[in-house]
C-alpha cells in the first residue's frame, strides 16, 4: 500500500508517517514527491509517499496537535494526503461518477482520492489528456467539479465539498494568481490608475482580494455579472 503525508520538513513528514501508520521508520520506503521552499507566496513543505507491505494501524486521532507557527489554524503535520483508494461507499460513488463523465467525453482517466479533510474530499484525475480536462484557465476542470458537487448533493452530502485537480493545476494556478496580484499592484501604483483583470471564478477572485487586502494604497473590487467576474485593482493613495 502507499500513503502520502506532508510536513514542514522531510523529517517531520517521515515522523508523522511512522506515528500515524504505527510503524518503525525501517518498515517503509520513502519517496519525496514534492518540496516547496519558503517564499513570499507559500510556506515551505515536503510531501512524501510511503510504500509498505506491513499491516498498518492508522491513527487519525494524532492529527489533533496544533502548531501555532505553521499557519494559525492548520493542524501540525496534518495527514491531508492519505490512502488513494476509496474508504467508503460515498467516495467510491464519487470516483465512479467523475470517471464515467470523463470517459463519456471520450478520454481515458484514472481517478484517485487526493486528500481528505473535514467536509472536503480532493480527487486527482490522471490522464494522457490532462490538458483538455483542465481546459483554458481551468474552466473544464471547474465544470467537472461543479457536476461532482451537484452529484454529491444528490447523494445527501451537500455539506461535503469535492475538489478536482489534475497535474497539480490548482496549486500552480494559485501561485500564478498571487504573482499576478502583486505585479498588477505595482503597475497600478506606478500609473496611479486601475487595471481590470481577466474573468475569474469566485475562489480565484477571493485569492486576489485577500492577497492585496493588506496593501494600504491598493484596493480591489469585483465587476460584472454571473459566476466569472473580473477584479479591478486600483490605486487609492495613502
Image (cartoon, rainbow, N blue to C red):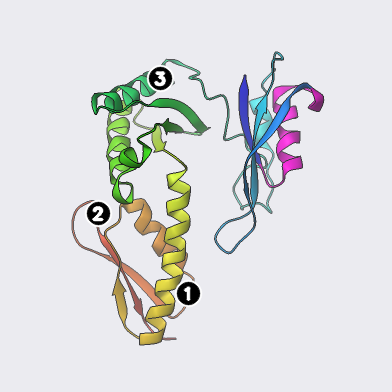
Mark 1–mark 2 Cα distance, whole angstroms, equals 25 Å
Mark 3: secondary structure? helix
The reply to whether residue 156 is in sight is no
The quadrant where residue 47 appears: top right
- The foreground one among 152 and 164 is 164
Left-right relation of 38 to 19: left
Q: What numbered label is drawn on residue 90?
A: 3
- What span is colored magenta in the figure? 7-26
Name the residue at 61% across, 55% down: 43
Eye-nearest disc, 1 or 2: 2
Q: Residue furthest left?
A: 225
Q: Residue 206 in the image: state x and y as whole percent.
A: 38, 57
Name the residue at 48% across, 27% down: 113
Left-right relation of 47 to 128: right
Tag 3–tag 1 contact (CB < 8 Å): no
The quadrant where residue 39 appears: bottom right
Magenta region includes residue 15: yes
Residue annotated with mark 1: 215
- The foreground one among 36 and 146 is 36
Which sits earlier in the primary sequence, circle 3 or circle 1? 3
Q: Badge 3: few (under 14), some or many (20 or more) residues near its Cα, within 10 Å?
A: some
Residue annotated with mark 2: 228
Mark 2–mark 3 Cα distance, whole angstroms, equals 30 Å
Q: Residue 161 in the image: state x and y as whole percent.
A: 39, 35
Amino acid at each position: 500500500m502507499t500513503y502520502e503525508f506532508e510536513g514542514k520538513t522531510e523529517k517531520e513528514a517521515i515522523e508523522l508517517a511512522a506515528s500515524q501508520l504505527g510503524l518503525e521508520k525501517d518498515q517503509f520506503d520513502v519517496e519525496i514527491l514534492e518540496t516547496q521552499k519558503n517564499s513570499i507566496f507559500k510556506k515551505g513543505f515536503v510531501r512524501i509517499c510511503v510504500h509498505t507491505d506491513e499491516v498498518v494501524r492508522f491513527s487519525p486521532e494524532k492529527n489533533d496537535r496544533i502548531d501555532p507557527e505553521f499557519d494559525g489554524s492548520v493542524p501540525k503535520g496534518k495527514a491531508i494526503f492519505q490512502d488513494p483508494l476509496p474508504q467508503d461507499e460515498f467516495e467510491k460513488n464519487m470516483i465512479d461518477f467523475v470517471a464515467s463523465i470523463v470517459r463519456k467525453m471520450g478520454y481515458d482517466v484514472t481517478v484517485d482520492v487526493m486528500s481528505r479533510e473535514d467536509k472536503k474530499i480532493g480527487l486527482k484525475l490522471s490522464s494522457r489528456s490532462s490538458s483538455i480536462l483542465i481546459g483554458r484557465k481551468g474552466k473544464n476542470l471547474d465544470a467537472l467539479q461543479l457536476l461532482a458537487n451537484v452529484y454529491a448533493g444528490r447523494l445527501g452530502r451537500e455539506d461535503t465539498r469535492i475538489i478536482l485537480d489534475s497535474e497539480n493545476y490548482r496549486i500552480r494556478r494559485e501561485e500564478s494568481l498571487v504573482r499576478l496580484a502583486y505585479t498588477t499592484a505595482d503597475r497600478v501604483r506606478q500609473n496611479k490608475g486601475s487595471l481590470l483583470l481577466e474573468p475569474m471564478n469566485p475562489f480565484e477572485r477571493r485569492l486576489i482580494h485577500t492577497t492585496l487586502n493588506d496593501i494600504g494604497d491598493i484596493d480591489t473590487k469585483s465587476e460584472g455579472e454571473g459566476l466569472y467576474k473580473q477584479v479591478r485593482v486600483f490605486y487609492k493613495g495613502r
